[in-house]
Image (cartoon, helix red, strand yellow):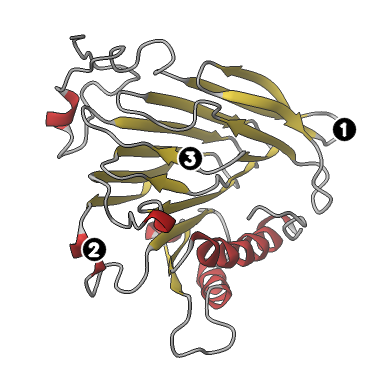
Amino acid sequence: MATTTPAGGDEGRTPPGFEAYAAESLAQSPAGAVGKGGELDLRFSRGSDGQSRLVYDRATVPFHLTGGLAHDEALPEIASAYVQDPTGGIAQGDRYEASIEVEADARAHVSTGSATKVLRMERNYGSSHLSIRVDDGGYLEYLPDPTILHRDARFWQSIEIDLGRDSAVLLADVVVPGRLARDEAFAFDRLHASVEARSSEGELFADALALDGGDHLRGPGLFGEFRVLGTFYVVAPDHDDVETLADDLHACVQDDDGAEEPPAVGGASVLPRESGVAVRVLGDRSSDVTDRFARVWDRARRELVGAGAPDTRKF
């Protein structure tokens, strides 16, 4: 049986509760081996004509990139990129490493071609680490499709954000705890997801979600009657009035018809150091969450770059 060795930068930073998983060897290729250690690097730059473009990209299996696009009718100068994973999902021992850099005054939108599936696991775990850097005056939207945790999935996700002056990041993270149509809700093994943001002034905030799967998640104070959790971060430490922005985004996720049993509930709060706003939503289905996030995206965009969200089927 193959011996597992730390790969993809996991050594020395495995979150609590994952140490035993990391020591488990794999019958197939070792963790982080070729095809299991995908790497993705994107860099966007603003040209003299004011148009932002994808000027550098590198992708190794299992990542695949469609290339840079400029098709946003609401914000023509923004560059878009869609990341694909043709392998079908994150398997045990997979180590994904990605970085996105947005140079000064550039604007970029990055998303995925479909939901990220974290597959069933018997040994070890899967991880995805993303490093984001947005230089002075830059703007990034990282809005991937939801992450679906299959039965017995073990997943560690971390995102680190570095911001320059007058820069901003919109970040969405929607977690579906099982293939709901197959009655797999909360049948995953373990999830650890974290977001950390810093600027030249130091750390702005750190937010972490650590969940062990099981029916206890259906209890009050946790998921309750809902099954899907989403967080939308608007990180803009130099924005003039985050209190008003938080109120506006809170209104975006309220139920329109005042139903006694709405399909989703949520709210918004100001991030530490007034570095932006965090919006959290619980919903019956992923679409109940992403529909509300579409409103959040549109409102935050209008506030930060003066243009609403484009007409798209994706949030």
Q: Depth check: 16 or 124 in front?
A: 124
Give the image location of residue 187, x and y in percent: 26, 51
Q: Which mark is residue 217?
A: 2
At a point 48% along the width and 40% down the height, the residue shown is 116
> Of the residues under marks 2 and 3, which one precedes in the sequence?
3
Relative to 136, say whether 226 is above or below. Answer: below
Farthest residue to the right: give it: 49
Q: Amino acid at mark 1?
A: Asp
Q: Amino acid at mark 3?
A: Thr
Name the residue carrying label 1. 49
Quadrant of the rendering where the C terminus is positioned = bottom right
Camera-near label (2 vs 1) is 2
**Toward which corner of the image does residue 224 lie, by quadrant?**
bottom left
At a point 23% along the width and 44% down the height, the residue shown is 190
Q: Amino acid at mark 2?
A: Leu
Relative to 109, say whether 12 is above or below. Answer: above
Q: Depth check: 260 or 106 in front?
A: 260
Q: Which mark is residue 116?
A: 3
Camera-near label (1 vs 3) is 3
